Amino acid sequence: MTSDGTAPFHAHIYHEAHQRPASDALHARLTAMMESGEAPDLLMVGKLREGPVGPHPLPQFETHFLQRALPQILALIEAAGLRALVHPLTDDDLADHTTLARWVGGGPLDLDLSVMDPPGENKGVPRFGRRDF
């Protein structure tokens, strides 16, 4: 990670059915912050996924941001009362989602680790900050 706070980070923000209104509200808030420039280090707010996708067993959306935005993003997730997996984006997809990850707002979920990219081939790196995937 860089010492200047520009290391890439992701947050996967999950919701169960009864939490959908909170997830919608947080998604809208993060999108507005990004689009208005209020959070210049927030680079992407992804689509709300209705079911499991990739290794993630619950509906979720992901955000991409720079490390220096971590305190702000964590505070918003915690205030929303949602569970999130927050991790740096390195060249090791498995480590990003396990040993380098932090769970916020609840204990860890059982991720499907069989779909992780092998070390050195993290496909999340080239799509960091992009909205078109």
Image: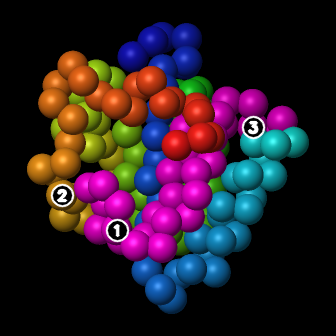
Give the labeled residue for mark 1: 52
- Considering the whole magenta stretch, tell me its main secondary structure: loop
* Disc 1 element: loop
Gap in Å between the C-alphas at discs 2 and 1? 10 Å
Q: CA distance from mark 2 to mark 3?
A: 31 Å
In this picture, which residue range is highlighted in magenta? 37-65
Q: Nearer the viewer, mark 2 or mark 3?
A: 2
Question: How would you rate the neighbour count of disc 1 (Cα within 10 Å): few for under 14, some for 14-19, many for 20 or more?
Answer: few
Please give the residue where the numbered disc 2 appears in the rendered image: 112
Q: Which circle's residue, 2 or 3, is located before the other in the chain?
A: 3
Quick one: SS at disc 2? loop
Above or below for 115 versus 68: below
Mark 3 residue element:
loop
Within-10-Å neighbours for mark 3: few <14, some 14–19, many 20+: some
Q: Amino acid at mark 1?
A: Pro
Q: Position of residue 46 (x, y in %)?
A: 58, 51
* Residue at x 66%, y 61% (from the top left corner): 27
Question: Could you tell me if residue 115 is visible in this image?
Answer: yes
User: Does residue 38 appear to the left or right of 25 in the view shown?
Assistant: right
For label 2, the crowd category at 10 Å Cα-Cα, with few meaning under 14, some 14 to 19 and many 20 or more, is: few
Do residues under tags 2 and 1 come within 8 Å of each other at their CB atoms? Answer: yes
Residue at horizontal 48%, vertical 11%?
3
Residue 16 higher or lower than 126, as above or below:
below
Instruction: Please say whether residue 4 is one of the residues in the magenta stretch.
Output: no
* Residue most extreme to the right: 36
The disc placed on residue 23 is none
Q: Earlier in the sequence, mark 2 or mark 1?
A: 1
